[in-house]
Image: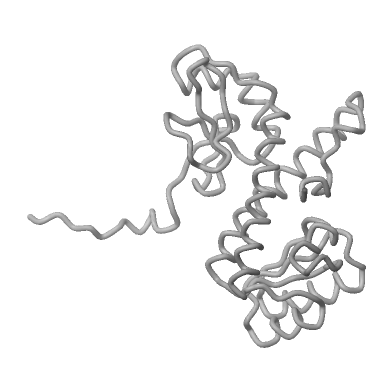
Amino acid sequence: MAATSRKKSGRRGGSYRTCAGCRQRNLRRVSLRLVRDSAGKCQPDLFGKLTGRGMHLCPDLACFHKAAEQQAAKRVFRQASEFGQPQVLADAFLSASIKQIESIFSIALRSGWLSAGRTVVKQEIKRGRAAFVVISQDASASLSKEIKGLADKNKVTWVEILSTKVLSKFHKGKPLAVLAIRHRGLARRLTDETSIAIKLTESIKKYINNNPQLTAKSVRGKMRDQRAG
């Protein structure tokens, strides 16, 4: 009987990976991967290019701490391994995620798939051309409410992330509080990357708030402007 190349329906959403910390299964594309280097240290695979056996984690600082406490690296790699500092690793993944998001914005801008500014974005949403909307974290309350309401009405995905200063890089240096991506493929990539960045940011902020002995300099509540450099 000839083999068939037809995919199983259960795999159409993509492959899954199990978090070494909480044991939850996540889609591979939103799972964070670490590999063991020749010195036995766990290195974050920030852009999915490192070879070798990998250990996967949720984009949640709590899972990094659980993995460290449970010596998950030794279990996954089946040999002595140094996991490292959970927050340092989580911060590295957050920085990489922000870079990926900005890279997608740059691609959209160069290709003519990025629309900037309140009036233009509203028009794109109403015309059904906007695939993904970004609202800056420091946008005015009125702008934020208006764009969210319009996006929800037209079933367009939106997120609040980064600052007007960071977004200005994609608007000829002018302050920018809202932009829209019109390319569906880029929108799907942004959905994954912003999900990772937001979850990491929230989990890091929560951890800091639950550990008041840590200094204020460690707080990563909002996407920091220095990441735009």
Residue furthest top as drawn: 80
- Tell which of 60 and 46 is nearer to you: 46
Residue 191 left/right relative to 7: right
Q: Quadrant of residue 103?
A: bottom right
> Which residue shows up at 65% across the image and 77% down it?
130
> Which residue shows up at 62% across the image and 69% down it?
110
- When the figure is inspected, residue 204 is found, relative to residue 211, above or below; the finding is below
Q: How many marks?
A: 0
In percent of width and height, residue 41 lies at 56, 19
Residue furthest left as drawn: 1
- Tell which of 72 and 185 is nearer to you: 185
Residue 47 left/right relative to 148: left
> Which residue shows up at 46% across the image and 21% down it?
77
Residue 137 left/right relative to 156: right
Which colour scheme appears in the figure?
A: one colour
Q: Quadrant of the N terminus?
A: bottom left
Residue furthest front as drawn: 172
- Tell which of 198 and 229 is nearer to you: 229
- When the figure is inspected, residue 17 is found, relative to residue 214, above or below; the finding is below
In percent of width and height, residue 59 lies at 64, 41
- When the figure is inspected, residue 203 is found, relative to residue 112, above or below; the finding is above
In percent of width and height, residue 33 lies at 54, 36
In percent of width and height, residue 229 lies at 77, 48
Residue 138 left/right relative to 67: right
